[in-house]
Amino acid sequence: MLYLPDKTFYLLLMLVVPLLVWQTAAAQDDHHPPMDGEFIDLATLGMSGGSNHTGHDGLVNGRTAITTEAVHAYNHLRHFVGLDHATIDEIGAWAFANTLTNNTQAWGNDQQGVGIWYAMQGAKVGWMADNTFDPQVVCDITRTARLGDREDVMAMVVQYGHEGFADYLTNNGYEDAFINTLKMEPHYAGWMHDRCHGWRSIEGVAIAHDVNHLTVLSHDQMEPFMNDTWDWPQWPALNVSHARVLEYFQSMVTLGDPMGNHLDDLGDPPVNNDPDEEPGEEPDEEPDEEPGEEPGEEPGEEPEDPTTPDVPNESGSLSVEVEGDLWWDGFTAAITVHNDSDVKLEQWQFRFASSHTISGTPWGCTVETTDLGNGLYEHRVSGAEWAKSISAGGSVNVGFNGDQGMALGNSGLLDADSLFDGGWIGDGDADEETADPGSPDSPTETAKISVEVEGDLWWDGFTAAIAVHNETDAKLRQWHFRFVSSHGICGNPWGCRVETTDLGNGLYEHCLKGADWAQCIPAGGSVFVGFNGDQGVSLGHSGLLDADSLFDGGWIGD
């Protein structure tokens, strides 16, 4: 008589336990404790499962959480090799452009989180010299940082690092950030597998994800290239040459081609007399190499003037390769731009005609589009951010998403013939004079624009996608408009800047100004910008955003 109740009890138990586990996991994601101090914990940007070292409860034997302190260590290393400080958005954009992520498109906080994660990886490994690199050293110094003495860590930096790097860290007070980054657990918060599982092929025997496992150690922290969840090696990575492994991690530092060569000859280390300088600020003293020069140039050498005939800026010195994927009515284009000259290109661009349009935010480039009529568009692609310049004989990888004009199908691969179906143009007046923004030929007033608002509502917030149309027959070099709203704007807008004034009584005046790739609008053309926001007057937890809801305090105009 007790059999049925017992059986029912166990059936219920089998149903309830997974539910409780799921609820516990969700609660950990939603209520993950913030880190104390000045640095941002990666888990605050998102957290998921995937490793026994995902949460704080798995950070054992000296392993620590990933925080933005790693970005400090990363930028200290960039300064040492003569490069400007990089933002987490720039690092994240580079990773997405080079197929080092799960997806081709960043959503939500993905670009920032990926940027923090790859900054950590670059800082962990990129300090090592080519002639002394060994994966076992990465393991040994990590274990020493977590469980040993800092003096022993720095002794290993002297022995295996770039010449002068140990003194650079010590003299500028950067030791703590460096050692603390070595302690960080790559599996922490789940980003290694959820967002940074790169599918890029490495030497045809592994993918980027496998090589990323260099910094994942065995349970006893005695071996590199391990998968500590099961404590066995990441087998494909063991077949990659040591030289390629180091170049791959050094590319994270230079934001260069993951399959290229980097940091071979650094010259003399820079001088920095301000140990408390925050990454992102300019150093008090100029480094011996101008930021942005290729490592290996002689310190103190005057950079060539990019406008002189000896330094071509035209796309006649370029060749491009196109790869990508097709999807329903759209595509993703991954373009490798080669500098075929024997001098550095400080700025590059090329033009092509196409039946296809370009949408969203490009990575590594800006795109200006002119409607040629008859279903054709001219797209001018120019290098930007980390891909603005190309070293002599070098390459950069950039890309964008687009909407199909002539149908290409809903799956398959994109190639150059499909993308450039209207014809290749080449360069094209790269140095043309620009109109005076204040002249009658270049209107800037919002009376010349119209806007359309779309977007999605979510719990207490929204995402606004705004199409800004140039209603004139002249190019707008700059545009802006203002509106009053009960809603606040949060996070980083895309394609625009937002200046907000609190008007009181629960209302705000927002002024949107075109920025980056959306600063200009061609005659009769449009740009697409947007932002996330917090609901003032409640709009609900799901559904669509429209202009009436966003501009609920009234339209002002220019």
Image (cartoon, rainbow, N blue to C red):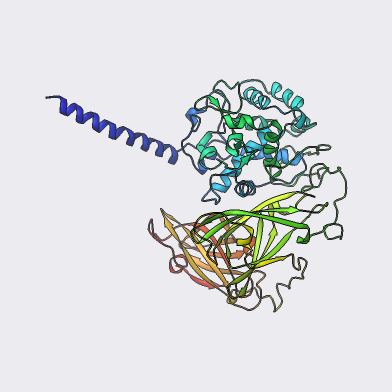
Whole-percent x, y for residue 427 in the image: 74, 64
- 303 to the left or right of 194: right
Tell me where residue 180 sits by quadrant: top right
- 101 to the left or right of 76: left
From where the camera sits, is residue 276 visible? no
| Above-or-below relation of 36 to 335 | above
From where the camera sits, is residue 543 visible? yes
Q: Which of the image's four quarters has the N terminus?
A: top left
- 387 to the left or right of 494: right
Query: For the point 73% across and 31% down, which residue is it?
Result: 128
Closer-to-camera residue (556/394): 394
| Above-or-below relation of 21 to 218 | below
* Number of numbered markers: 0
- 322 to the left or right of 389: left
Closer-to-camera residue (385/481): 385
Whole-percent x, y for residue 384 in the image: 69, 56
Query: For the point 58% across and 65% down, which residue is it?
Result: 357
| Above-or-below relation of 436 to 207 | below
Whole-percent x, y for residue 127 in the image: 72, 33
Whole-percent x, y for residue 320 in the image: 70, 56
Tell me where residue 419 sits by quadrant: bottom right
Find the residue positioned furthest to the left: 1
Q: Which of the image's four quarters has the C terminus?
A: bottom right
